[in-house]
Image (cartoon, coloured by chain):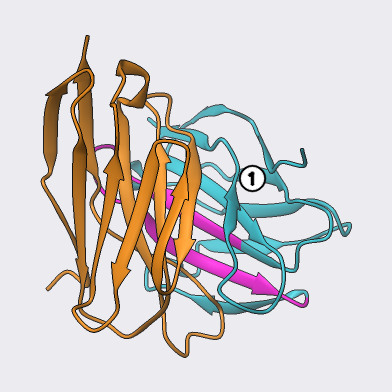
Amino acid sequence: KNEVEQSPQNLTAQEGEFITINCSYSVGISALHWLQQHPGGGIVSLFMLSSGKKKHGRLIATINIQEKHSSLHITASHPRDSAVYICAVTPYMDSNYQLIWGAGTKLIIKP
Amino acid sequence: EPEVTQTPSHQVTQMGQEVILRCVPISNHLYFYWYRQILGQKVEFLVSFYNNEISEKSEIFDDQFSVERPDGSNFTLKIRSTKLEDSAMYFCASSDGTGPYEQYFGPGTRLTVT
């Protein structure tokens, strides 16, 4: 059983649409991370959160610890947002803070 | 802005050869990681390194793998005798502090074993 599940696997939308990507996890965590992977392969950390909500530009990340669920929202989506978005968690009491990764959501925004 | 760098960006090697992948973490960071991503699959944890020693390793990180921080700045991953299934993108990451801090990733090294 995967410890981190994302949905959808693939998402295609028109420019301007509001995007939601979901992440569920089954382990206790000390933090949840949203990362972006571009077609060239590089990985960029977008958010790290352990409660509530964070916002950066058009990106919003929320987490519900009780429900073990997080969402990443993109407002006013743009073709340059096209990438793979990955949810990863730092398990609670893992003193090495390694990440357990989801499989990613491939997002394509069409102009 | 400080960044994690990795060299080479792409390495092609023959099966059975040794490879060394190099990373320069952000200078004041304390934790270092190697992850790999086989094409089309999710990223997997390989090893974490803290205080000049391995702090945790995954099942993937068998005796063929080793890590080193030879000079206080570089962080290397060595694969002693490469196999076809070692072909993957290898990412180095580093983080600051002793909590679940944000990890900063290098651009990756694409390893192709032929």
The chain painted cyan is B
Q: Residue at x 47, y 35 (%)?
A: B111
Taking the spot 31% from the left edge, 20% from the top edge, the residue there is A78
Q: In the figure, B77 relative to A10: above or below?
A: below
* Vertical position of residue B103 compared to residue B13: above or below: below
**Residue A22 can be seen, yes or no:** yes
Q: Quadrant of the N terminus of chain A?
A: bottom left
Q: Residue furthest bottom?
A: A93
| Residue A81 appears left or right of B33 | left
Instruction: Specify whether residue B16 is in view.
Output: no
Determine the residue positioned at 71% across, 41% down.
Answer: B3
Nearer-the-camera pick, B14 or A83? A83
Q: Is residue B36 magenta?
A: yes
Q: Chain of mark 1?
A: B
Quadrant where the C terminus of chain A sits is top left
Residue B23 image offset from top left, x and y in percent: 69, 46
Q: In the image, B79: left or right of A39?
A: right
Q: Position of residue B68 (x, y in %)?
A: 72, 62
Pick the front one: A53 or B75 = A53
Write down the region rendered in magenta: B33-51
The foreground one among A86 and A1 is: A86
> Residue A85 sits in which quadrant?
top left
| Quarter where residue A6 is shown | bottom left
Residue B22 location in percent, x, y? Answer: 68, 44
Whether residue A33 appears in magenta in the rendering, the answer is: no
Judge left or right: residue A93 versus residue A88.
right
Q: Which residue carries the number 1 mark?
A: B20
Residue at image position (17%, 69%) is A2
Q: Residue B94's x, y, as percent?
A: 65, 58
